[in-house]
Image (cartoon, rainbow, N blue to C red):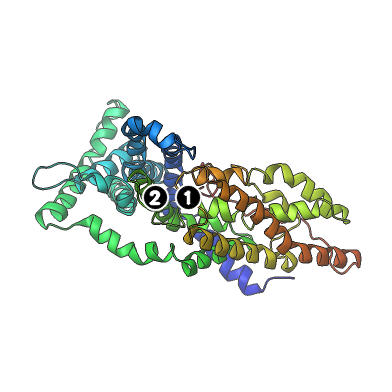
Amino acid sequence: MTASPWLHRWLIPRLTALSGNTYLASIRAGMVSVVPLTILGGLFMVVAYLPIPGWEARVAPHLPLLQVPVTATFGLLGLFACLAIGYDLGGRLKQEAILSATQSALVFLLIQMEMKDQTLVMDGLGSKGLFTAILIALATVRLQKAFSDANWVIRLPATVPKVVSDTFVSLIPTVFLVVAFWVLRFVLGLDLNAGVQALFKPLVFALNTLPGILVYAFLVTMLWSVGINGDNTLDAFVAPIFLQYLAENVEAVGRGQPMPYVTANGFFSTFVNVGGTGATLGLALILALSRDPVYRRVSRLSLPTQVFQINEPIFFGIPIVLNPWFMVPYVANALLLTTATYCLMDWGWIRKPFVNVPWTTPPVIGQYLATGGDWRAAVWGVVSLLLAMAVYWPFARAAERQRAAGALPVPEPIPADPRPDPGPDHRPIP
């Protein structure tokens, strides 16, 4: 099956450009950089709430101590994200990256201060300030770049050490940024956090609904189906939301309250992407015993990586890209597992995710850890894999028959779409 000229000439180039956009790439890189912090905080959450009879009473005296690393990570997510995005974007725009990061953090902290006692509002430094942090980082570095391009900076003689001259180069834009945001926050009295939250509220609400997360699952898999990294293309928009959900679930668990969000970080990457986006581990297990030598060889080669959620070998080797025999079950599996997992969590049959696990964690283990040790989630991991195999089975057998009849030649493997600027954000956020 050949895609239409419109798809190749118009849609795919534009979506590829969007995926490689400098500002979106910086957001992805910044969000990836805070993931280890959430994993660290999650480890302490696991220790604090191990699903062992009598553990709660035993650990109760030490609970405040165990909560300290959780607060130091999840409670400062906004600040860390602002620093990381500012640093990455500064480097991409050929600015002094460390100064870009400090400028971003300075402005972000400024608008989190109370007028009366001039103390920081801690809620704004955490997940509730994530969107503000992102916008502040983008705006401050872009303004820094504008001042530099216009030469509205103080430049010292070349004999002055670079570390000193760079500081003076950043002085005028820093003063401008501080004064501008000081006027907005304290002179005009604008609550920037509240304004940003209101702006993104419809998207934040939608992604925790079944229709909203189904639209997301459909878009991710459809983009992958035409050769575009669907996770990377959309992560800049959705990763802050999923991370905010996770942080609020962590906060709820710490307070002994019901977790508010089903689709927190880990829902899609762990429960839907079983062995990779589209649950392709199921396809690899079926084709590993295929009568067709090409399918069999590709599947067996991909199995070791798919155990760790890396499915590019089978995705581009079969291929699934632009191949209707496998595109249909690929998308269908994502929609099926999204719907089933959402309902099971919403009904309370499986615990909602509140522990951030690395995206490379093998299936079943990942579901168990993401829910803080819920054995029912591990069982659902096994069932999910069986369901994925059931969906792929008739399509795989039909493709084998077509191959045997010579009606479906296997095309040359389609190479992955090259990223214009590969970096630490080349994989989707877990």
| Crowd class of label 2 (few under 14; some 14 to 19; many from 20; radius 10 Å) | many
- Residue 359 seen in render: no
What percent of the width, then of the height, locates residue 378? 60, 47
Q: Give the Cα distance between marks 1 and 2.
A: 8 Å
Q: Is residue 392 left or right of residue 345?
A: right
Q: Is residue 338 above or below residue 87?
A: below
Label 1 crowd (10 A; few <14 / some 14-19 / many >=20): many
Relative to residue 113, is residue 58 depicted above or below?
Answer: above
Which of these two is toward me, 344 or 153? 344
Could you say which is closer to the camera, residue 162 or residue 32? 32
Q: Which residue: 58% across, 56% down?
A: 272
Q: Which mark is residue 249?
A: 2
Depth order, front residue of 231/123: 123
Amino acid tagged 2 = Asn
Q: Quadrant of residue 397?
A: bottom right
Q: Position of residue 51 (x, y in %)?
A: 49, 40
Vertical placement of 413 versus 310: above or below? below
Which of marks 2 and 1 precedes in the sequence?
2
- The answer to whether residue 79 shows anywhere in this view is yes
The answer to whether the residues at label 1 and label 2 have Cβ atoms under 8 Å apart is yes
- Please give the residue where the numbered disc 1 appears in the rendered image: 353
Looking at the rendered structure, the secondary structure element under dot 1 is loop
What is the x, y in percent for residue 280? 68, 55
